[in-house]
Amino acid sequence: MTPPTPDPGSPDLGVYIHWPYCSRICPYCDFNVLRDRGRNEEQRVLFSAILEDLTAQAELTGPRRLVSIFLGGGTPSLMDPDWAGELIAAARRLWTPAADLEVSLEANPTDAEADRFAAFAAAGVDRLSLGLQALDDEALKLLGRNHDAAAGRRAALIGGKVFPRLSLDLIYARPGQTPDAWRAELAKALDLGPEHLSPYQLTIEAGTAFDRAVRRGSLVPPDEDTAAELFETTQAVLEAAGFTAYEVSNHARGVAARSRHNLVYWTGGDYVGVGPGAHGRLTGKRQRIATYAAPRVPDYVANVQEMGNGFAKYDVLTPREAAQERLLAGLRIAEGVPFAELAALELSPAHREVAALVTAGLVADDADRLRATPAGRLILDHLTGRLGV
């Protein structure tokens, strides 16, 4: 089946596929996940529902050029690689694949998952996003991970050989972490040869095990000054290694190494979300539509079977809501957001708050785009609050 040709000017499209199953639930995680033990039949049914939902949403979007497919979760590397191959092939049939279509897979660095990397590459995955999270055994225990540092290194080295693109995720601002220790850990990660690094500052999310531990006083995150020093250490080490911070928590060695799918989010692109709890954003008839899939697996499957898609609801965003979303995402990247896309917020270079932030060195002096400076990216919540979000 050959996908229909997109209409000229129709937005490019990304596809996000959410696989919610994990071998264990990490104490810092607030994603829509559940333990995979004993759920074989449920997973088979969910796979079929996701496949059907993809077809339904292709009818909704109409012809589009497909620029990215992202299998996230959860732990999609626990999925049967043949299923991943079927989902990738379906997306390629339903939309028109771009010549540089990127297919990404999130994985944990256990030996069992690393043994399956070749099968996922054969299924069509070309970017591996590997959740190392740390290269220190004590830190990995604290983070509730089911691998040690040696397994992480093995998986990264295998992933670098199997996939054309390798990205490593790391978590910093851990309790007791020092800038010197973090600098040494980053050097170890760089020795593994990735072209993309995603160092995320540990965030204590409401309702997680870490949140409860902080409230009990048994977990003490670094103070703001230490966290800021760790952030600055990240920038300095990776910049010296030839990586550009194209987003607050994402660094790439060259433009081609940037995550195609995440750029769809940050630049206000369109994307389909399938799988329990997946979100989507679509543009139609000058409206921005937000879609939300049912988060529980039984509800998602029932929606697909009864209604044809997995949506629990969808919203037509007001121009102001759409502009707020654009601002929140766009300030995270180095290129920022064109002022023309923020008209509903009445923001311009002459706006009082914009001018004040430029004077404070937190926003760039740019007549065309609203861009946070490196100093501004340290305090994005402050910036967005002052700009009306």
Image: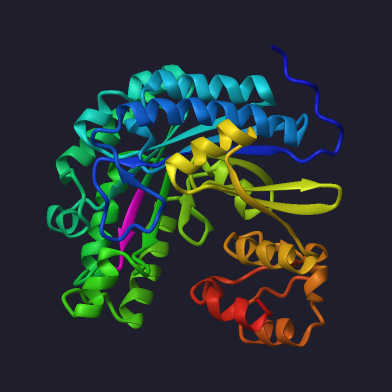
Task: Report if residue 311 lies within the magenta region.
Answer: no
Would residue 3 be visible to someone looking at this image? Answer: yes
Residue 371 in percent (x, y) is at 66, 68
Question: Where is 350 relative to 92, above or below?
Answer: below
- Does residue 105 appear to the left or right of 50 in the view shown? left
The magenta-colored residue range is 169-173
Residue drawn at (18%, 54%) of the image = 140
Compared to residue 291, the image places residue 87 above or below, namely above
Seen from this angle, which residue lies furthest top? 1
Of residues 100 and 360, which is closer to you in this image? 100
Residue 171 painted magenta: yes
| Residue 234 on image: x %, y % | 37, 63
Q: Quadrant of the C terminus?
A: bottom right
> Residue 364, relative to residue 335: is it above or below?
below
- In the rendered image, which quarter contains the N terminus? top right
151 lies above or below 382 = above
User: Where residue 308 sits in the image (x, y, percent)?
Assistant: 63, 32
For this orientation, the residue located farthest to the front is 306
Helix, strand or loop for the magenta stretch, by majority: strand
